[in-house]
Image (cartoon, helix red, strand yellow):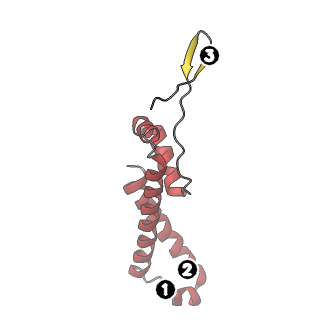
Amino acid sequence: MATKITYTQQGDYLLPDLKLPEQPTVKIGIWGKRHLRYLEKHHPIIYTNLLTSCKLTTYLADIDKQAEDMFFQLVKRLAEHEGVTEQLKADNPMLWVRKMNNIRNRAEEIVNNEMIYQ
């Protein structure tokens, strides 16, 4: 089965009308978007290869899911390790908020270093 190729005139040249196949619509969260920006800026060849092979969306969705899981596991483990409990939240809410913000910031930094900016 032959595929008919169409062309568009651009100045003195005829360029083929190329279009990538439709990719599934997948919601990509903050982690996947960060990794996308990283790939575009620091690894354009990898980005282009994933894009042209139609694997970029699923790759970013996978990175996003893994990073989100890692983040929540880290937050949970660090909170348990440091004794940040619901009882602390009830007794001293401001201390609980400070400690949880600190834990979340550290967990975010770990995920960024180990998964997103690698």
Return the x and y of residue 105 as percentages of the image width and height.
Answer: 49, 64
Q: Residues within 10 Å of mark 1 (few under 14, many from 20)?
A: few
What's the CA distance linking mark 2 and mark 3? 66 Å
Q: Amino acid at mark 3?
A: Gln
- From this view, report whether residue 115 is shown above or below residue 83: above
Residue 95 numbered mark, or none: 2
* Circle 2 or circle 3, nearest the eye: 3
Q: Between marks 1 and 3, how big is the CA–CA gap?
A: 67 Å
Q: Earlier in the sequence, mark 2 or mark 1?
A: 1
Query: Does 107 sit left or right of 28 as displayed?
Result: left
**Residue drawn at x 57%, y 76% as measured from the top left:** 97
Residue wearing tag 1: 85
- Above or below for 9 versus 21: above
Q: Amino acid at mark 2?
A: Leu
User: What is the quadrant of residue 63 in the picture?
Assistant: bottom left
Count of picture labels: 3
Q: Identify the amino acid type marked 1.
A: Thr
The residue to which callout 3 is attached is 9
Which one is in front in this view, the residue at disc 2 or the one at disc 1? 1
